[in-house]
């Protein structure tokens, strides 16, 4: 009988934590609901300058690597492919339609060491800083060949200092 009360209290606290997390995520999505739909890749793209596979880690507000964008399929980490074309970048995030980031929206590219819940070795992440709905955001990728991907990205966009 003396174990029932502490067990109920602990379960109540755990339940409150999960309710708080759910309400926080819902509030974040509500605040970001005005962001526009993501662009789809155009039917005609030039030959890719680079193609790589790895993980989509997160899209965050630029210079705020803990402020995740949670809408339009950008909220969760997933396997992804990335292709750099002269017209822009195509992200193929598992379970989502392909996303196109036009060259005109790209503000810069670079390398980072951490974002949100992901810390990797020095310069282990590649980020693309782009303008999305009037807001500069960083899309972070963990790929097999980060140096060659950054080199290809720098042919269509300027380099910027590490985001984090």
Image: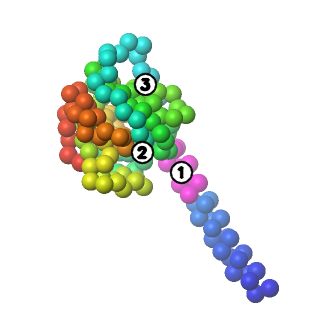
Q: CA distance from mark 2 to mark 1?
A: 17 Å
Instruction: Tell me which numbered mark, 3 or 1, is placed earlier along the sequence.
Output: 1
Residue at image mark 1:
25
Crowding around mark 3 (Cα neighbors within 10 Å: few <14, some 14 to 19, many 20+) is some
- Does 60 appear in magenta? no
Farthest residue to the front: give it.
144
Instruction: Tell me which numbered mark, 3 or 2, is placed earlier along the sequence.
Output: 3
Crowding around mark 2 (Cα neighbors within 10 Å: few <14, some 14 to 19, many 20+) is many
In terms of secondary structure, where does tag 2 sit? strand
Residue at image mark 3:
39
* Quadrant of residue 14 within the rendered picture: bottom right
Disc 2 versus disc 1: nearer the observer: 2
Crowding around mark 1 (Cα neighbors within 10 Å: few <14, some 14 to 19, many 20+) is some
Instruction: Tell me which numbered mark, 2 or 1, is placed earlier along the sequence.
Output: 1
Question: Eyeballing the image, is 55 above or below 14?
Answer: above
Instruction: Report whether residue 160 is seen.
Output: yes
Residue at image mark 2:
57
What residue do we see at 40% from left, 16% from top?
Answer: 42
In which quadrant of the rendered image does the N terminus lie?
bottom right
Give the extent of the magenta segment: 21-31
Q: Position of residue 37 (x, y in %)?
A: 47, 28
Please state if 10 lies on the left or on the right of 132 as rendered: right
Q: Main secondary structure of the magenta part?
A: helix
What residue do we see at 36% from left, 33% from top?
Answer: 52
Q: CA distance from mark 3 to mark 2?
A: 19 Å
What residue do we see at 37% from left, 44% from top?
Answer: 142
Question: Eyeballing the image, is 29 above or below 148?
Answer: below
């Amino acid at each position: 009988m003396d174990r029932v009360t502490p067990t109920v209290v602990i379960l109540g606290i755990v339940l409150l934590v999960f309710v708080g997390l759910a309400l926080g995520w819902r509030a974040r999505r509500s605040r970001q609901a005005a962001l526009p739909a993501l662009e789809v890749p155009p039917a005609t793209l030039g030959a890719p300058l680079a193609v790589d596979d790895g993980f989509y880690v997160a899209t965050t507000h630029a210079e705020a690597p803990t402020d995740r964008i949670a809408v339009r399929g950008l909220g969760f980490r997933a396997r992804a492919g990335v292709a750099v074309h002269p017209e822009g970048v195509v992200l193929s995030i598992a379970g989502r339609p392909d996303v196109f980031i036009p060259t005109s929206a790209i503000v810069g590219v670079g390398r980072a060491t951490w974002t949100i819940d992901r810390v990797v070795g020095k310069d282990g992440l590649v980020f693309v800083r782009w303008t999305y709905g009037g807001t500069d955001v960083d899309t972070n990728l963990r790929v097999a060949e980060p140096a060659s991907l950054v080199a290809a990205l720098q042919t269509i966009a300027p380099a910027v200092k590490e985001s984090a």
